[in-house]
Amino acid sequence: MNNISLKKRICSRVAVTLLLLAIAPALFGAQPVVPPPIGAAPDATPAWSEQESSNNEMQVFIPATAAKRASTQPFVLGPVIFRPHVNYDLTYATGLQNNTNISGTNNIGKPPTNSFDSIIQTLSPGMTLDIGRHLTLDYTPTLTFYSDKHFKNTLNHAASLNAATDYGDWGLGLNQSFSLSSAPLAETAQQTETTDYKTTASGTYTINEQMYTELELDQDLNYVTGFEDSKTWSTMDWLNYSFWTRLSVGVGAGLGYISLSNDQPVRGQPEPGDQQFETLQAKVNWRATDKLSLAVNGGLQIQEYDAAVSPAVTSVNPVFGASIQYQPFKHTQLSLSANRTINPSDYNTQSQSQITSSVLLSLNQRLLEKFYLDLSGGYTENQFSQPSQASVNNRTDNSYSFSARLSRNFLKHGNVSLHYQYSDNLSSTAGFTYHSSQVGVEVNYSY
């Protein structure tokens, strides 16, 4: 294998890592009752790294933004390419929660959550800068307006910096992101302000033609007004072996430390203790055919809770992830994914961990050569766990969702779409069950 092909393989794996980091909050983070606008914050992976990802043998679906970046350079100043983008969304939503009396999960015996209907308008103008081929910076503010007086109009912010390069046999990546948002959340049953800082440093080292390592360091600082704040430092490292370019296996180990603190402590209840965890996993990536690929990982996560939560507790939980990509026809894409993760619980003052299990099925289809139809449906179970207390205090939410979007491009860089989403959340704790539907129109223009 020559040096060029080695570099491409390194770069493609770094790109995939960055793309996964970009979508991870959507899969495992807080659940907004109303989803964020699709076009508000475009992917900010560096152009070089993103284009190299199209050479990844494991990916059936080539990122659409890779081709778009390569073909459009509207505003150039020296080594910097300016890519403005703007998004407007008009949505009518029913079943929005805003029970300001709820703070955490101790709501047994309280009246049901207040439910409201509202017209929601969001405007998201932003700018992406491609600085050379290895660095990308994006900033996107979002103005949100509610017609119902029970919700506050907000100005949200999202910024990210991504870098990727190679050095000899190393592929290196860096991601820094910031977000400040206030939206109705399923976890809190009310409009909740969250501030999040994420930092990830990743590296891939090619040992020989068959073996390579993946190394990653993460920091996640999450602040939730009125609820628990969390600070997480972790690492996950893999040793992989490629039988051939379309089949690889790997074993990985990771560890981390979590610090929890109550923003507004509940009287008579102890402060949450810190946690530490260790993870052992194995994975298989297989591109079975040109139209089908599978990726599976799974293992155990050992969670150790600080003695401040008397008595100290250690729990062992299975964690896993799986995805299937299938493209039966040129303009038809089917995907199925399932995940189980354990994360700190920021939204419940009596809980320390949030165990999330989910499955999602999606279909993407081009219609009449000009229209694009996206359908998805899924199920998510969230367990808010306090291992040191009786299970009666724990809360479990079962959520079902369906979404549909019909879109069409216009004027080369524009996109207009009609969208619909239905969400049904059944909670074991009074005040957190809701049924919500949203229908709206969205217009996006971006370079």
Image (tube, rainbow, N blue to C red):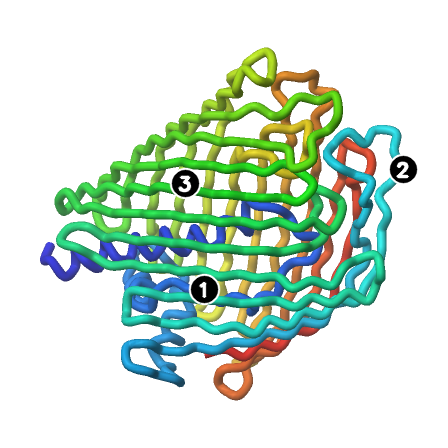
The answer to which quarter of the image holds residue 237 is top left
Circle 3: element type: strand
Query: Residue 421: x and y, percent?
Result: 70, 59
Residues at marks 2 and 3, CA–CA distance in whole angstroms? 43 Å
Secondary element at image label 1: loop
Residue under the point 34% across and 83% down: 76
The image position of residue 339, as x and y in percent, is 52, 40
Question: Disc 2 or 1, which lies upstream in sequence?
Answer: 1
Which is closer to the viewer, label 3 or label 1?
1
Numbered disc 2: secondary structure: loop
**Along the viewing direction, whichever of 427 and 174 lies nearer the viewer:** 174
- The disc, 2 or 3, on the residue closer to the chain's N-terminal end is 2
- Image coordinates of residue 252 in percent, x first then y, are 32, 33
Pointer 2: what residue? Answer: 111
Q: Is 98 placed above or below 257 here?
A: below
* Mark in front: 2 vs 3: 2
**Neighbour tally class for label 2: few under 14, some 14-19, many 20 plus, Cα within 10 Å:** few
Residue tagged 1:
43
Q: Is residue 103 above or below residue 245?
A: above
Residue at position x 53%, y 67% from top? 140
Mark 3 sits on what residue?
A: 296
* Left or right for 354, reference 55: right
Name the quarter where the N terminus is drawn: bottom left
Q: Is residue 200 left or right of residue 195?
A: left
Q: Nearer the viewer, residue 105 or 69?
A: 105
Q: Residue at x 44, y 71 (%)?
A: 128
Circle 3 packing at 10 Å, graded few (<14), some (14-19), many (20+), is some
Q: Position of residue 209 (x, y in %)?
A: 14, 47
Q: Nearer the viewer, residue 260 or 1?
A: 260
